[in-house]
Image (cartoon, helix red, strand yellow):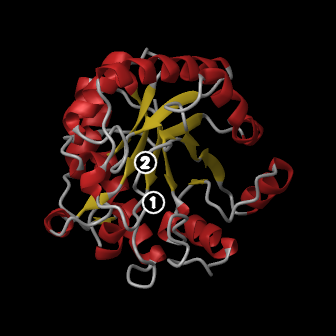
Amino acid sequence: MSIRFGVSPIAWVNDDMPELGGDTPLSTILADARDIGFVGVELGDKFPRDAAVLKPLLDGYGLDLVGGWYSGELLTRDVEAEIAAAQDHLKLLKAMGSSVFVHAETSNAIHGQRGTPLSRTPRLDDTGWKAFGARMTGFADYIAGQGLKFAYHHHLGTVVERPQDLEAFLKITGASVGLTLDTGHAALGGIDPVAAILAHPERIAHVHCKDIRAEVFAGVQANNSSFLDGVLAGMFTVPGDGGLDYAAVMRALADIGYCGWIVVEAEQDPAIANPRTYGELGLRTLEREAAAAGLKKAA
C-alpha cells in the first residue's frame, strides 16, 4: 500500500480565471513540479490532449499524468450521452496510464461565475437526487469497466457542497462512485475532511489537499461574494499555510489503508503566492505528516 504525490497546475495557471498566470508557459509548470519533487501532475488547459505528444513531454520531466478534471452534465443528459461526451478525455487518460477519472457535475454549477455569489449554489430535492444518483452510478460503472477508478469531486458552488449534500450523494450512488476527497472544499463547505475519510473509507478514491484561511472565507460569506472572489481574496492556500490539521488528515488516510495519489492543489494568485515556493511548502508538509502517519511513498 503506497502513496504518490502529485500537483495541480492551477497554482501556476488558473483555468477558471486565465488572467491568473495565463502567460506562464507549460515548461515552467512542469520544470517547477519536477524540481519541487512531485512525481505526477494533473491536466490543465495548457496541456496537449494528444497522448503521442503529451507522454514524451511529461516523460522528459520525469512526471506521470495523475488525471484531470472532467466537467460532467448528468443533470441534463443521460448516461449514454455522458459516456459519448467523455470519450476523448477517457481515451487520453487510458493512453497516459492514468488510474483515476475525476468527475464533477457542472451543468448548473456557479463556481466559475464571478458575478454569482456562493449563496446561490444550486440544490437538489429528493427527486433530483434520485435521478442524479442513478445516472452517476451508471456512468461510474462504465468508467470502472474501462479500468479506472471513478472519483467524484465535491466542490463549492456545485450540488455536492455541504455535509447534507455529501450524505445524500453517497446514499443514492453505488459502490463504483468513489470520491475525490478535497480537504479545502470539504472544510469550507462545512464537511470535516477527517471524519469524511473515516466514515467512508471504501469511497475515498483520490485526494486533493489544499489548506484554508477561514477568516477570509468568513468575509466571502459576509459580503455575499462569489467563489472566484474568494479565490482572489486568498481563502485557499497550500498545506502548512492555513488552518487545517494535516497530521490528522494523513493519520486518517493511513487508518483506512489509502493508496493512490495525494495532490497539492491550491487556487491562488501566482503573482502573490509564488507557485514554486508554495508548492515546496505544501509538498514538504504532506511528506512530513504522511511519514509520521506511516504512509509509504511508492518507490
Q: Residues within 10 Å of mark 2 (few under 14, many from 20)?
A: many
Give the number of marks. 2
Q: Amino acid at mark 1?
A: Gly
Q: Position of residue 13 (x, y in %)?
A: 55, 71
Q: Position of residue 49 (x, y in %)?
A: 76, 53
Q: Amino acid at mark 2?
A: Ala
The residue beneath circle 2 is: 109
Q: Residues within 10 Å of mark 1 (few under 14, many from 20)?
A: some
In the image, farthest residue toward the right = 52
User: Can you say whether 130 is above or below 12 in the image?
Assistant: above
Q: Position of residue 153 (x, y in %)?
A: 43, 40
The residue that appears at 40% across and 67% down in the rendered structure is: 114
The residue that appears at 50% across and 70% down in the rendered structure is: 17
Q: Secondary structure at mark 1?
A: loop
The residue that appears at 34% across and 19% down in the rendered structure is: 127
Q: Are marks 1 and 2 in contact (CB under 8 Å)?
A: yes
> 94 or 191: which is nearer to us?
191
Q: Is residue 102 left or right of residue 286?
A: right
User: Can you say whether 88 is above or below 54 in the image?
Assistant: above
The residue beneath circle 1 is: 112
Q: In which quarter of the view is residue 257 placed?
A: top left
> 145 or 241: which is nearer to us?
145
Q: Position of residue 278 (x, y in %)?
A: 39, 72
In the image, farthest residue toward the bottom = 271
Q: Where's the C terminus, which quadrant?
A: top right
Q: Is residue 274 left or right of residue 223?
A: right
> 271 or 238: which is nearer to us?
271
The residue that appears at 76% across and 62% down in the rendered structure is: 60
